[in-house]
Amino acid sequence: MTVAEPTAQSVAEAARLLRDGQLVAFPTETVYGLGGDATNERAVAAIFEAKGRPQFNPLISHVLDADEARKFVRWNDTAGKLAARFWPGPLTLVLPRSPGSPIALLATAGLDTVAIRAPSHPVAQALIRAAGRPIAAPSANRSGAISPTRAEHVAESLGDRVPLILDGGPCLVGVESTVLDLTSAMPTLLRPGGATREAIEAVVGPIAVSDALPSGSSARKSPGQLESHYAPARPVRLGASTVGADEGLLAFGPTVAPGAMLTYNLSPSGDLGEAAANLFAMMRTLDRPGIGRIAVMPIPETGLGLAINDRLRRAAADDGKDRGR
Ligand code: TXA
Ligand code: MG
């Protein structure tokens, strides 16, 4: 496994690997992606294999822009408005597969819909352009582990399962993209993420929220959202106002509960954007031997706080049977 600074040469080499059906880990503004040629079933299978995922969950296909997306999905006016406002950026749109769409079936887990987005990270864009094809990419971690926001996280989690990692530095958004289903009458939020519900509703009016969020058992339109992606190996306790001596504390805001074995503050100033950017790295750092449990201070349920709390609830709900780290 090679970790490379993104240069014209390393991006060209990454594109060659992708066209050859191999995998490349690359930075996006949300988290690092484990990329494979989205039109190549074998390459997509290699993604699941490298991740060690127990199921085939549908993956996001990454493209440059709306014009390119139209080649792969049945586009509509709502998609056009949302893409104009959010692309490139952390919003994934679920749309019907277009007739003859070359997106691999395995990339959509056999669904007749495709999740698609245009990332804003310049290295991701350069790679898509050089590869000349859409890139399927889930987060670049082993199944059950925390999503990587730095190249080192990818190297730790995937090691030699990925031949090349493009190191674009830390991810600025720090949580995955928002997934919005545009295949039913009302746009439906399948996964909260970097684009807030409020900002989406400002463009398209009221949207529905999937009743599978975050852990319901009804029809699951976004099966991947129910995985224990975000679970550390240690138990997680939410809403902590006091801390035990065996606990590591994930703090938020200026007033930190005293007495923890180790404390990381998501944002001393209480900035949810900063907290999102720190979330996975700090959870990872607290998830270490000697710490009995991770306590998390309350995070406001507004804006990006919804996405942060969604991840934290999944981590807390995990009973340990499916932990990857
Ligand atoms: O920020 C992100 O979205 C990152 C970066 C690398 O772009 N990618 C990512 O991919 O988080 P992944 O595979 O971990 O998550 C894809 C999400 C899952 O919740 C999955 O269930 C949903 O998108 N999804 C994919 N295709 C879908 C489809 N056809 N219908 C409904 N949900 C879908
Ligand atoms: Mg993931």
Image (cartoon, rainbow, N blue to C red):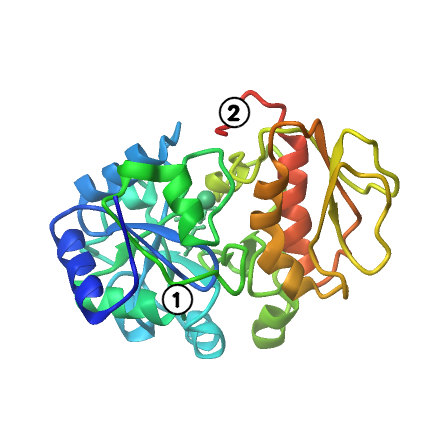
Q: Position of residue 72 (x, y in %)?
A: 26, 61
| Badge 1 or badge 2: first in the primary sequence | 1
Q: Residue at the location (58% across, 59% down)?
A: 277
Q: Is residue 238 visible?
A: yes
Identify which amino acid the numbered label 2 is placed on: Asp
Q: Residue at the location (48% across, 44% down)?
A: 222
Q: Nearer the viewer, residue 134 or 128?
A: 128
Answer with left or right where residue 52 lies relative to residue 71.
right
**For the N terminus, which image quadrant?**
top left
Q: Residue at the location (61% across, 48% down)?
A: 282
Q: Nearer the viewer, residue 257 or 113?
A: 257
Label 2 environment density (alpha carbons within 10 Å; few <14, some 14–19, many ≥20): some
Label 1 environment density (alpha carbons within 10 Å; few <14, some 14–19, many ≥20): many
- Residue named by callout 2: 322
- Mark 2 residue element: loop
Answer with left or right where residue 102 lies relative to residue 29.
left
Question: Can you tell which quarter of the image residue 11 is in?
Answer: bottom left
Answer with left or right where residue 172 lies relative to residue 248.
left
* Cα gap from disc 1 to disc 2, whole angstroms: 30 Å
Q: Residue at the location (48% across, 73% down)?
A: 86
Above/below status of 260 relative to 87: above
Identify which amino acid the numbered label 1 is placed on: Pro
Q: Position of residue 320 (x, y in %)?
A: 59, 23
Q: Is residue 215 visible?
A: no
Q: Position of residue 12 (x, y in %)?
A: 16, 64
- Mark 1 residue element: loop
Answer with left or right where residue 233 lies relative to residue 136.
right
Numbered mark located on residue 22 in the image: none
- Residue named by callout 1: 119
